[in-house]
Amino acid sequence: MIKNFDGTQIKPGSVNIRLDSLYKIGSKKKISPDKITAKECCISLPYSLKPGDYVLGKSMEQFTLPKNYCIYHTHRTSTMRIGILIVGGYGDPGYKGEIYFGIKNIGENTVVLKRAMSLSKVIFIAVEGNSLPLISRFQGGKLL
């Protein structure tokens, strides 16, 4: 179900996720969630995330979820304590690819983001019964 991880990431109720790369949406125009046309801009790491800044992160880990499991992606408490808000989400049964997530500095201090830094975690949830086939334009870890 997970590629590119090691045993130290496994916790009693979750698996820690590491940061692979950062992106910024390269447009300040209005963006519709249904049709994102802005171009992404890769940001080199380490990166100093200033208070109020928002970037997108991509996980080092790749997921291949079977039909009977989904994932809930959320922050780690240590991330929250330094003023970083992780905007995670939900991974449907059948999803394949990396996870993208929002990273917002809601604190008062600049935070240096580094490759392989563990900012978030996933929680696996068993799905009972039949799940519908996943149809998503983001399948395979696509950003936009």
Image (cartoon, rainbow, N blue to C red):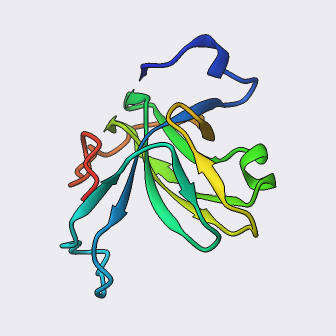
Percent from the top left, x then y, of residue 28?
A: 33, 83
Image point (46%, 61%), residue name: 55
Percent from the top left, x then y, of residue 58?
A: 41, 44
Question: Is 7 on the left or on the right of 36, as rendered?
Answer: right
Taking depth in this image into account, of 125 and 138 the one nearest to the observer is 138
Question: Is 29 on the left or on the right of 114, as rendered?
Answer: left
Percent from the top left, x then y, of residue 89?
A: 51, 54
Query: Would you place residue 1 above or below residue 93 in this image?
Result: above
For the C terminus, the quadrant is bottom left
Which residue is at the far top?
A: 7
Quadrant position of residue 107: bottom right
Percent from the top left, x then y, of residue 42?
A: 31, 52
Image point (55%, 14%), residue name: 6
Which residue is at the far bottom?
A: 30
Quadrant position of residue 60: top left
For residue 66, say whether it is visible.
Answer: yes
For the N terminus, the quadrant is top left
Question: Is 16 on the left or on the right of 4, as rendered?
Answer: right
Image point (76%, 23%), residue name: 12
Taking depth in this image into account, of 7 and 53 the one nearest to the observer is 53
Image point (26%, 43%), residue name: 133
